[in-house]
Amino acid sequence: MTPVRPGACTGARMTDPDRDHMRVAIDIARRGAMAGEPPVGACLIKDGELIAVSHNGVIGDLDITAHAEIRVIREACRSLRRLDLTGCELVSTVEPCCMCLAASHYARISRIVYGASLADINAHTHGELMLTHEAVLAGVDPKPAIRGDVLGDECRALLHEWSGRLS
């Protein structure tokens, strides 16, 4: 029998934690859309563990700041009983807007993963502030690690379905 070197695929399906967490965010975004909210979902991860999950609540809460990302940051701070979320990862179906990026910065979130871009959602809403994470985080140190387009096609499909219902 040939020994298997560490890290080699042994026939078991290898997973990408970012994709797994994005699936959680997509599921909660769908629930939000069914409740009449824009289809944006987010989750916050610490050491591989799911700490908080939420969808947009802007319409239901009558709160313009109730973006999915803000809601998970609030929930995580309460759950962990601290404001410093160093070591946490924010996963969102849509690239965080400048407000959500600022909140992520102040919470010291270490990593951000998103699916659809701001340009993708703007194609449906025509009202997004088109300040990309590069522009918002210019001059900020340390910057969070950012990975985009994770399950992007699925996230864009949610936006497309939603905008079709608005027409």
Image (cartoon, rainbow, N blue to C red):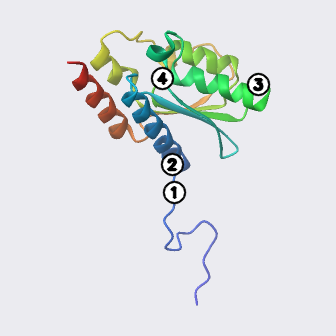
Report how far apart the C-alphas of labels 2 and 4 lie in the structure.
20 Å
Name the foreground residue: 35 vs 125. 35
Kind of residue at disc 3 = Asp
- Mark number displayed over residue 112: none
Kind of residue at disc 1 = Thr
Kind of residue at disc 2 = Asp
For marks 4 and 1 on the same chain, the one whose residue lies earlier in the sequence: 1
Residue 17, percent across and down?
Answer: 55, 49
Residue 61, percent across and down?
Answer: 51, 14
Name the foreground residue: 78 vs 85. 78
Q: Which residue lies under the disc numbered 1?
A: 15
**Residue 143 showing in the rendered view:** no
Name the foreground residue: 157 vs 137. 157
For marks 3 and 1 on the same chain, the one whose residue lies earlier in the sequence: 1
Secondary element under disc 4, as helix, strand or loop, is: loop
Q: Which residue lies under the disc numbered 4?
A: 56
Residue positioned most to the bottom? 1
For marks 4 and 3 on the same chain, the one whose residue lies earlier in the sequence: 4
Secondary element under disc 2, as helix, strand or loop, is: helix
Q: Which residue lies under the disc numbered 3?
A: 84
Residue 101, percent across and down?
Answer: 57, 18
- Contact between marks 1 and 2 (CB within 8 A): the answer is yes
Q: Which residue lies under the disc numbered 2?
A: 20
Report how far apart the C-alphas of labels 3 and 1 lie in the structure.
29 Å
Report how far apart the C-alphas of labels 4 and 3 lie in the structure.
23 Å
Secondary element under disc 1, as helix, strand or loop, is: loop
Report how far apart the C-alphas of labels 3 and 2 lie in the structure.
25 Å
For marks 1 and 2 on the same chain, the one whose residue lies earlier in the sequence: 1
Residue 69, percent across and down?
Answer: 55, 24
Report how far apart the C-alphas of labels 4 and 1 lie in the structure.
27 Å
